[in-house]
Image (cartoon, helix red, strand yellow):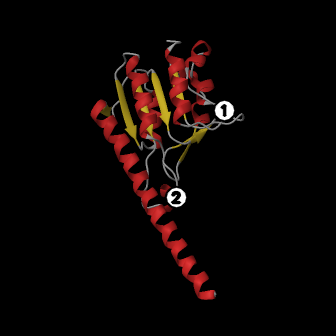
Amino acid sequence: MLSIFLQWLVYLLAAITVMRALQMGFLYMEDFRGKRLLAKECRQNVPSEAVIILPGVDWRDPFAWVKANFHLDDIKTVLEFARGKGKPVSFYAGPSFGEVKDIMADKTVKEVYFVGHGGTDFFRLGTEEVLCYGIFNDPEKYGKEFVHQVHCGTLYGKSLIRCVVPEENRKKCFFHPGKINSYFIEKEFSMLKGLI
């Protein structure tokens, strides 16, 4: 009886290992395909009127393999929305804290999209690196026409939108104080198109 149990346990562990390996491959390919799409469509690591910021991934860190930083569908939705506004678009994949600060301080950058994981008052720049939006709480220095926080939020904290976007433009920015998914992102950006 014990040998049958151990045999089934080995099968179960083998199946879980195979599923994790497939998931890890999927996450890596999703990250690669998303960045490749943007590289074909936009300039990279240079300021433009609209900038898309994606988190970096340290694939050597085991936590990077747990869930995707973004999905290809989300990038397609954001890119379509940004290009529909007729502004030049660029993207930064895994920018440093200093690069994000430069983007936010650059007055030629009018619109910023943070796509990935975060909360109301923070964004994950990388697997272990967190950007707190509160450091941009100076609309004179970091003001933008629009900011889109394309990640989860909460009911607590001060969003980057409240820190740097003029009151009259805030309803035209993407932000949700809860969990989001690709379907929700697509639906919200469709509604925002009607406000432009």
Closest to the observer: 144 or 52?
Answer: 52
- Can the viewer see residue 191? yes
Q: Which residue is mark 2?
A: 63
Q: Residue at x 52, y 58 (%)?
A: 63
- Can the viewer see residue 144? no
Where's residue 62, x and y in %?
49, 62
Q: Looking at the image, is 5 positioned above or below residue 58?
A: below
Where's residue 192, x and y in %?
53, 18
Q: Residues within 10 Å of mark 1 (few under 14, many from 20)?
A: some
- Marks 2 and 1, Cα distance to the nearest angstrom? 24 Å
Q: Looking at the image, is 46 positioned above or below residue 173?
A: below
Q: Which residue is mark 1?
A: 177
Question: Mark on residue 190?
Answer: none
Where's residue 7, x and y in %?
54, 81
Where the N terminus falls, by quadrant? bottom right
Q: Residues within 10 Å of mark 2 (few under 14, many from 20)?
A: few
Name which residue type carries label 1: Pro
Name which residue type carries label 2: Phe
Left/right placement of residue 140 relative to residue 75 reads right
Q: Looking at the image, is 129 positioned above or below residue 123?
A: below
Left/right placement of residue 38 relative to residue 14 reads left
Q: Which mark is first along the chain, 1 or 2?
A: 2
Q: Residue at x 42, y 42 (%)?
A: 95
Secondary structure under the numbered disc 1 in the rendered image:
loop
Residue 82, image quadrant? top left
Secondary structure under the numbered disc 2 in the rendered image:
helix
Whether pointer 2 and pointer 1 mark residues with C-beta atoms closer than 8 Å, the reply is no
Closest to the observer: 185 or 89?
Answer: 185
Where's residue 38, x and y in %?
34, 35
Q: Residue at x 56, y 77 (%)?
A: 8
Q: Residue at x 59, y 28 (%)?
A: 175
